[in-house]
Image (spheres, rainbow, N blue to C red):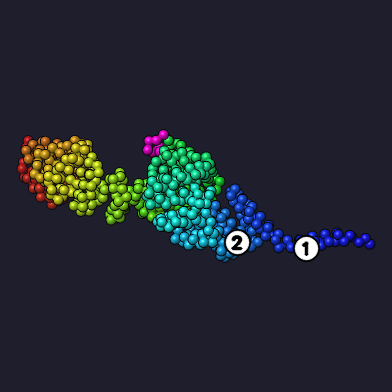
C-alpha cells in the first residue's frame, strides 16, 4: 500500500475546512447575484427575466425579491398585483423601505395620496437617502396642497448629486400648483440646464409651457425628450398635444404633425402591450384628439374598467361626454379630472343646462376670482349676468354686467342684457341707452332692434319704436321676434291709419311664419272685412274659431258678414 505524503493530507484537510466555512455564505452570494441581475433586467426593460430572478430571490427568503416582483407589476401598470407583492414583502420584512415605498406608490398612482403619505414617510424614516421615496413624498404633499411641507421634504434632495435635477423639477411642480408661475419656471429651467440630456427635465419644462397654453415653447423641450427616449408614450402624447395647441393658435405647426405623434401612441404602443391599462387610456385620449370621439369614449371607458384612474383621462372623457351631450356623465368624469379654465367654462355651462344655477354661478365666480381681467373672466362675468337676468335678479345682474362692460366696452351682449334688466325695472332712459348701444355694436342682430323697439313703446316713443320694428324685420324676417314686430308694424303703420290693404299685406307675413297666430288672423279678418273682401274675411274668422270657438271678435265679425247680403 502506498501512503500519501503528509503535506498532501494537510492540504486536503485545509480545503475541506475552507469549504465548510464558506458553505453558509454561498447561498447568500447566489441570492445577492440574483437580485443584482434582476435589478439590471428591470432597468433594461426585460420584465419577464426580471420577474424570474426576483421570484428566485424571494423563494430563498429575500423580502427585496418579493418587492422586486411588485416593481415589475408597477412597470406593467397593474397596481393591484403590485400592491399584493409589496404587502407580502412588508410581512417578510417590516423594515424594508422598498416595500413601504411600493405600497405608497400603488396608492399614489391611484390618486390616493392620503393613504400613500404614511407609507412614504415610513420609507424615508427607514432610509434617509431614498430619492424615489423622497420625491413621491413631496409629490403627495403637493397634491394635498401642503406646499410648505412639500418644500421641506424635497429640499434635502438638492444635495444628492445626480438626483438634484429631479428634485428641482419636483420643487417646480410645487410652485406650479400654488400658481407661482415665475418661480416654477425658474426651477424647471434650472433642472433642464443641470441635466440637459435627461428626458424628465425636458418633459417638465415642456409641461410647464403647455400648461400655460404656449405650445410653440413646449415643442422643443418635448422633441428633445423624445429624441432621448423615443419609446416613452407619455412623451409622444405630450408632444402631440403641444403641436396641436400650436397649430390651433396659428403657429408654425400643423395638425398632421400632431396626428403623427398620436398615431404612434395609438398604433405602436397598444401593439407592444395590448393588455396595458395605460395603453388603452392613452389610446382613448389620442382618438379624441384625432376627432374619433365615439371610439375615444369606448377606449377610455375600457381603461376605466381595467382600473385606470388618471386625472388627465377623466378630463378628456369629460370633454368627449360634453360633445356627446351626456351631461350627467360629464359631471361624474370631471369630479375625477383636472380641469383647466376652458374645462371650467364647459362645466359651468353643463351645470346651467341641468338647471343647477347655483353650481354654475360658483364655477363662474371661481374663474373671476382667479384672474378678474382675463378673457375667461370676461366670459364668466357675462354668463353670470345672463344667469342672474334669467333668475330675475335684475339689480345683481346690472352690477355683474357693469363689471363686464368696464373690462370691455365693445361687447354688445353685456349692453343688451343690462338694457333688458333696466327695462324690467322700468328705468326707461337707462334701458334705451343700453339697448341703443347694443344695436350700434351689433346692427345685424334682429333681437337687439326688437327689444329697443319694445323699450321705446314702453316709454311712449311710438315713432322710434316703429323704426326699430321695421329694422327688426329688415334684418331677420323669420324669427319669433319678427312675428311681434310685424304685428306692431301692422297696427301702428296701417290699422290705425285705416290702410286695410297695407295691413293685410303685412299680416300675411305673420301667418307665413306662424299659421296659428290668433291675433294676426283676427286682424286679417277685420282688415279684409273693412276692405270689402267678404270671402277672405270669412276664411280668416273661421280659422280663428277653429283655434278658439268662443273668440268674441271672430264670432261677431262672422255673424255680421253672414247677416249682410253679399255685394255683387
What's the mark number on residue 17?
1
- Determine the residue positioned at 10% across, 48% down: 553
Does dot 1 land on a helix, a strand or a loop?
helix
- Determine the residue positioned at 38% across, 52% down: 178
Residue 402 within the segment the image draws in magenta: no
Above or below 217: residue 92: below
Residue 93 visible in the displayed image: yes
Q: Give the range drawn in magenta.
A: 244-252
In which image quadrant can residue 464 be found?
A: top left
Q: Position of residue 227 (x, y in %)?
A: 52, 40
Above or below 160: residue 471: above
Residue 524 is left or right of residue 197, and the answer is left
Name the residue beneath numbered marker 2. 63
Does dot 2 land on a helix, a strand or a loop?
helix
Q: Where is residue 29 in the image (x, y as percent from the top left)?
A: 68, 58
Where does the C terminus fall, quadrant-wise? top left
Q: Residue furthest top?
A: 252
Residue 243 is left or right of residue 510, and the answer is right
Above or below 6: residue 493: above
Q: Where is residue 405 in the image (x, y as percent from the top left)?
A: 22, 44
Query: Which label lies toward us, 1 or 2?
Result: 1
Residue 566 visible in the displayed image: no
- Determine the residue positioned at 39% across, 41% down: 214
Q: Earlier in the sequence, mark 1 or mark 2?
A: 1
Classify mark 1: residues with Cα within 10 Å, few (<14), some (14-19) or many (20+): few
* Frontmost residue, 389 versus 51: 51
Where does the N terminus fall, quadrant-wise? bottom right
Residue 248 within the segment the image draws in magenta: yes
Amino acid at each position: 500500500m502506498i501512503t500519501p505524503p503528509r503535506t498532501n493530507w494537510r492540504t486536503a484537510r485545509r480545503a475541506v475546512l475552507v469549504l465548510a466555512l464558506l458553505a453558509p455564505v454561498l447561498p447568500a452570494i447566489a441570492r445577492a447575484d440574483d437580485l443584482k441581475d434582476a435589478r439590471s433586467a428591470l432597468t433594461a426593460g426585460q420584465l419577464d427575466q426580471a420577474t424570474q430572478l426576483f421570484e428566485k430571490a424571494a423563494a430563498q427568503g429575500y423580502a427585496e425579491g418579493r418587492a422586486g416582483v411588485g416593481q415589475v407589476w408597477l412597470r406593467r401598470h397593474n397596481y393591484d398585483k403590485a400592491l399584493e407583492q409589496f404587502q407580502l414583502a412588508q410581512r417578510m420584512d417590516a423594515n424594508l423601505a422598498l416595500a413601504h415605498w411600493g405600497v405608497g406608490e400603488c396608492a399614489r398612482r391611484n390618486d390616493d395620496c392620503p393613504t400613500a403619505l404614511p407609507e412614504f414617510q415610513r420609507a424615508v424614516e427607514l432610509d434617509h437617502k431614498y430619492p424615489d421615496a423622497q420625491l413621491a413624498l413631496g409629490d403627495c404633499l403637493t397634491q394635498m396642497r401642503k406646499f410648505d411641507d412639500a418644500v421641506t421634504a424635497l429640499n434635502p434632495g438638492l444635495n444628492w448629486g445626480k438626483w438634484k435635477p429631479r428634485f428641482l423639477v419636483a420643487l417646480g411642480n410645487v410652485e406650479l400648483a400654488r400658481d407661482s408661475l415665475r418661480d416654477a419656471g425658474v426651477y424647471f429651467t434650472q433642472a433642464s440646464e443641470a441635466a440637459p440630456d435627461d428626458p424628465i427635465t425636458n418633459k417638465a419644462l415642456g409641461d410647464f409651457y403647455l400648461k400655460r397654453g404656449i405650445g410653440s415653447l413646449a415643442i422643443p423641450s418635448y422633441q428633445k425628450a423624445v429624441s432621448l427616449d423615443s419609446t416613452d408614450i407619455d412623451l409622444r402624447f405630450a408632444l402631440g398635444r403641444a403641436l396641436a395647441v400650436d397649430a390651433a393658435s396659428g403657429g408654425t405647426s400643423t395638425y398632421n404633425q400632431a396626428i403623427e405623434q398620436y398615431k404612434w401612441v395609438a398604433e405602436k404602443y397598444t401593439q407592444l402591450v395590448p393588455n396595458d391599462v395605460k395603453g388603452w387610456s392613452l389610446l382613448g385620449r389620442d382618438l379624441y384628439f384625432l376627432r374619433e370621439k365615439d371610439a375615444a369614449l369606448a377606449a377610455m371607458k375600457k381603461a376605466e374598467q381595467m382600473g385606470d384612474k388618471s386625472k388627465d383621462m377623466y378630463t378628456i372623457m369629460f370633454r368627449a361626454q360634453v360633445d356627446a351631450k351626456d351631461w350627467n356623465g360629464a359631471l361624474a368624469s370631471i369630479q375625477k379630472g383636472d380641469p383647466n379654465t376652458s374645462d371650467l367654462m364647459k362645466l359651468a355651462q353643463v351645470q346651467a343646462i341641468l338647471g343647477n344655477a347655483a353650481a354654475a354661478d360658483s364655477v363662474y365666480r371661481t374663474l373671476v376670482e382667479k384672474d378678474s381681467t382675463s378673457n375667461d373672466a370676461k366670459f364668466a362675468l357675462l354668463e353670470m349676468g345672463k344667469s342672474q337676468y334669467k333668475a330675475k335678479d335684475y339689480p345683481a345682474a346690472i352690477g355683474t354686467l357693469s363689471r363686464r362692460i368696464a373690462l370691455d366696452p365693445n361687447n354688445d351682449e353685456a349692453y343688451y342684457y343690462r338694457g333688458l334688466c333696466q327695462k324690467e325695472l322700468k328705468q326707461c332712459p337707462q334701458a334705451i341707452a343700453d339697448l341703443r348701444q347694443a344695436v350700434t355694436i351689433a346692427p345685424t342682430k334682429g333681437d337687439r332692434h326688437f327689444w329697443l323697439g319694445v323699450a321705446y313703446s314702453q316709454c311712449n316713443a311710438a315713432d322710434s319704436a316703429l323704426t326699430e320694428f321695421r329694422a327688426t324685420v329688415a334684418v331677420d324676417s323669420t324669427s319669433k321676434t319678427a312675428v311681434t314686430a310685424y304685428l306692431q308694424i301692422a297696427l301702428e303703420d296701417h290699422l290705425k291709419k285705416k290702410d286695410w290693404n297695407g295691413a293685410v299685406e303685412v299680416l300675411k307675413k305673420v301667418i307665413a311664419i306662424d299659421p296659428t297666430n290668433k291675433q294676426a288672423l283676427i286682424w286679417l279678418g277685420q282688415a279684409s272685412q273693412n276692405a270689402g273682401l267678404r270671402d277672405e274675411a270669412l276664411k280668416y274668422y273661421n280659422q280663428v274659431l277653429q283655434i278658439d270657438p268662443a273668440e268674441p271678435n271672430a264670432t261677431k265679425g262672422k255673424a255680421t258678414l253672414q247677416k249682410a247680403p253679399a255685394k255683387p
